[in-house]
Amino acid sequence: MAIEMRGVCPLIQVFDMPTSVRFYRDVLGFEVAEHAPLRGPDEFGWCLLRHESDTEIMLNTAYDYGERPPTPDPARVASHGDTCNYIGCPDVDGAYRHLRAKGLDVREPEVAHYGMKQLYVTDPDGFGVCFQWRA
């Protein structure tokens, strides 16, 4: 018997929760569906973000309260470039226009050699997000 699966939800360790929440919510359009106890505006140790009914991402603080250094660790951030979350997006060109309207300096979507139209953006922690759809 095969395993029945219904989606995937990555957990991303973030340096500054309010900054990350504002990016995913206010720029990309996710909603905060659940979160750990609130400590301040957009300040909690963990949250589940949801876009409509089937796209989810979880954010977790990389450091416990009172233990976060004043600036991100460059070695840790450098490794974030190895991670990219690919999100199905039927209107990649519309996503491009939306992100430009939100002030992001993103490159126009391109069609990869394997036939996917893709738009890449980087979140505040250096993790990639790719909006893609079959060209």
Image: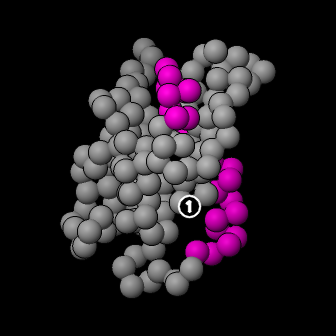
- Residue 73 picture location, percent across and down: 62, 75
Query: Residue at the location (71% across, 23% down)?
Result: 111
Q: Which residue, given by chain and number where applicable, does mark 1 sit on?
A: 125
- Residue 103 picture location, percent across and down: 52, 51
Q: Is residue 83 above or below residue 71?
A: above
Q: Quadrant of the C terminus?
A: top right
Type of amino acid under label 1:
Asp
Q: Which is nearer the eye, 28 or 73?
A: 28
Q: Which is nearer the eye, 124 or 57?
A: 124
- The residue tagged with tag 1: helix, strand or loop? loop
- Residue 127 picture location, percent across and down: 59, 52
Query: Residue at the location (47% across, 80% down)?
Result: 68
Q: Which residue, as the protein is rendered here, is positioned at the far left?
A: 37
Q: Based on the displayed image, in which of its 4 quarters is residue 35 positioned? A: bottom left
Q: How is the image coloured?
A: one colour
Q: Is residue 52 above or below residue 71?
A: above
Query: Is residue 16 on the magenta stretch?
Result: no
Q: Based on the displayed image, in which of its 4 quarters is residue 120 positioned? A: top right
Q: Which is nearer the eye, 123 or 100?
A: 100
Q: Decide if residue 77 is in sight here.
A: yes
Query: Is residue 95 on the magenta stretch?
Result: yes
Q: Decide if residue 11 is in sight here.
A: no
Query: Residue at the location (52% across, 83% down)?
Result: 69
Tally of marks: 1
Query: Residue at the location (45% across, 17% down)?
Result: 2
Q: Residues within 10 Å of mark 1 (few under 14, many from 20)?
A: some
- Residue 93 picture location, percent across and down: 56, 26
Q: Is residue 20 above or below residue 3?
A: below
Q: Quadrant of the N terminus?
A: top left
In the image, the segment drawn in magenta is 72-97
Q: Which residue, as the protein is rendered here, is positioned at the far right?
A: 113
